[in-house]
Image: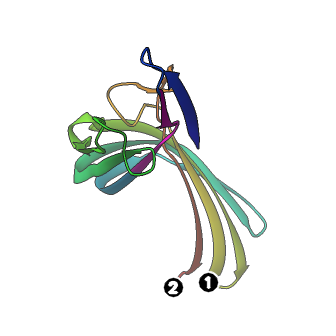
Amino acid sequence: MNIQIHINMQNGNVLTTNINTYYKANVNGQMKLNFFKAGITGSWQKNSFVFSGGPFISYFSGGFDKGLVHVSIGEGGVSGLEDYEEKYSNSSGINPLALEFMLRTEYRLFAGFGIGLQVTRALTPFYKKDFYIRGERMKFYTTVLGGQLHYSF
């Protein structure tokens, strides 16, 4: 969207110009994370259903969190305001130790075969520092939901 401005000059001329009123930001990121996890779980079985859960601790053993931010100002640019581009890496900002809680349910269809659903929620923030969204201080906690189809020997 453009705003058209008319400026009356002292010499009587009228200067007309368009001002772009928006910007567009594209953020492209990549994450590859490796964790070692250890936990203590308890389980309870009722007929063909098995319920389990417990606390886990995970250690961030390697990987990366990096990307590129590209900001375009208006259509075709504004005089003196060039597009902005910045690479970022948040790998060093990832908490190396995390506490998590896992809940899982499994339904045994018949001898050896079963289906399951598992949810894991972090109790500690993913990043060491808080970040801001629209001026509000935020923490980032991971939640993982997974399903499984399995056969036991």
In terms of image quadrants, where is residue 84?
top left
Q: Position of residue 125 (x, y in %)?
A: 42, 32
Earlier-in-chain disc, 2 versus 1: 1
Residue 97 position (above or below residue 36) = above
Q: Magenta part of the protein: which range?
A: 14-26
At horizontal 43% and vertical 14% (from top left) the residue drawn is: 10
Q: Position of residue 135 (x, y in %)?
A: 50, 20
Query: What amino acid is labelled 1 in the image?
Result: Gly
**Element class at badge 1:** loop
At horizontal 32% and vertical 38% (from top left) the residue drawn is: 79
Q: Nearer the viewer, residue 147 or 3?
A: 3
Residue topped by disc 2: 153
Q: Nearer the viewer, residue 135 or 32?
A: 135
**Element class at badge 2:** loop
Numbered badge on residue 43: none
- CA gap between label 2 and label 1 equals 6 Å
- Dominant SS in magenta: strand
Q: Is residue 129 left or right of residue 52?
A: left
Residue 25 drawn in magenta: yes
Residue topped by disc 1: 112
Residue 87 drawn in magenta: no
Q: Is residue 134 visible?
A: no
Residue 131 position (above or below residue 33) = above
Q: Nearer the viewer, residue 112 or 134?
A: 134
Query: What amino acid is labelled 2 in the image?
Result: Phe
Q: Position of residue 21 (x, y in %)?
A: 53, 36
Is label 2 in contact with label 1 (beta carbons under 8 Å)? yes
Numbered circles on residues, count: 2
